[in-house]
């Protein structure tokens, strides 16, 4: 089976490098990509000047039209957690994906969704100079993502679970 390596780069506002990692392409559609983060992958965190080993599998979603990403962490073959970044739409070019992370995150653990990193968002409004239009849009996109999840719209329509069920997990 041919594996297409896909390189992911997360940026902060102003295109400041934040973190990056390698994945494998699972599925590509019109304006979106699903990738697989392998168990043991290395995440280079520019902000913290460190490299972390990620010891779980993940199905990840990136879109060139939506203002969010999704990472579904897989533990023992089952989805353990969903982690959604609010971000500017991803740039998908060749085997590379980049996106500007806007700090607010929506996480699901034990079936309960919660917003995190509000404090980081507030701090970065000043630090990175987010324009008011971007601040307003970020909050609107968070609300839109919550509605998308509640109504079971793509990719929260079973697509992530379908892909997770197709993976042969081994370390």
Image: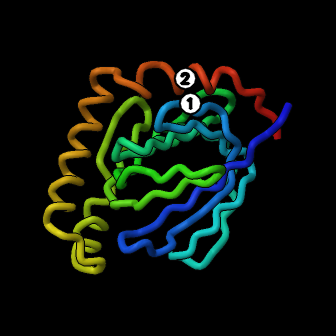
Q: Position of residue 127 (x, y in %)?
A: 28, 80
Residue at 34%, 51% (x, y): give it. Answer: 86
- Distance between mark 2 and mark 1 Cα atoms: 8 Å
Residue at 22%, 78% (x, y): give it. Answer: 126
Snapshot colouring: rainbow
* Residue placed under numbered mark 1 in the picture: 79
Q: Position of residue 135 (x, y in %)?
A: 19, 61
Residue 170: quadrant of the picture: top right
Q: Quadrant of the N terminus?
A: top right
Q: Secondary structure at mark 1?
A: strand
Q: Position of residue 146 (x, y in %)?
A: 27, 35
Q: Position of residue 50 (x, y in %)?
A: 63, 75
Residue at 24%, 54% (x, y): give it. Answer: 138
Does residue 36 sit above or below 169 in this rendering? below
Does residue 45 sit above or below 82 in this rendering? below
Q: Nearer the viewer, residue 100 or 82?
A: 100
Q: Is residue 63 left or right of residue 67?
A: right
Q: Which disc, if any, is residue 106?
A: none
Q: Nearer the viewer, residue 91 or 25?
A: 91
Q: Is residue 149 left or right of residue 170?
A: left
Q: Is residue 34 left or right of residue 104?
A: right
Residue 77: quadrant of the picture: top right
Neighbor class of circle 2 (other Cα within 10 Å; few <14, some 14-19, many 20+) is some
* Residue placed under numbered mark 2 in the picture: 161
Q: Dots 2 and 1: beta carbons under 8 Å?
A: yes
Residue 149: quadrant of the picture: top left
Neighbor class of circle 1 (other Cα within 10 Å; few <14, some 14-19, many 20+) is some
Residue at 82%, 41% (x, y): give it. Answer: 171
Q: How many circles with numbers are drawn on the protein?
A: 2
Q: Is residue 29 left or right of residue 132?
A: right
Q: Secondary structure at mark 2?
A: helix
First along the sequence among labels 2 and 1? 1
């Amino acid at each position: 089976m041919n594996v297409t390596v896909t390189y992911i780069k997360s940026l902060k506002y102003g295109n400041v490098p934040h973190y990056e990692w390698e994945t494998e392409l699972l599925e590509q559609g019109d304006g979106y990509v699903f990738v697989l983060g392998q168990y043991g992958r290395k995440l280079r965190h520019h902000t913290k000047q460190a490299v972390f080993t990620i010891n779980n599998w993940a199905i990840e979603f990136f879109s060139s039209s939506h203002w969010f990403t999704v990472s579904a962490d897989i533990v023992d073959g089952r989805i353990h957690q969903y982690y959604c970044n609010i971000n500017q739409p991803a740039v998908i070019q060749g085997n590379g994906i980049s996106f500007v992370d806007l700090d607010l995150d929506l996480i699901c653990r034990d079936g309960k969704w919660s917003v995190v990193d509000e404090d980081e968002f507030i701090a970065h409004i000043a630090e990175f100079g987010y324009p008011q239009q971007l601040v307003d849009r970020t909050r609107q996109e968070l609300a839109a993502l919550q509605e998308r999840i509640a109504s079971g719209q793509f990719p929260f329509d079973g697509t992530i679970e379908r892909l997770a069920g197709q993976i042969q997990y081994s370390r």
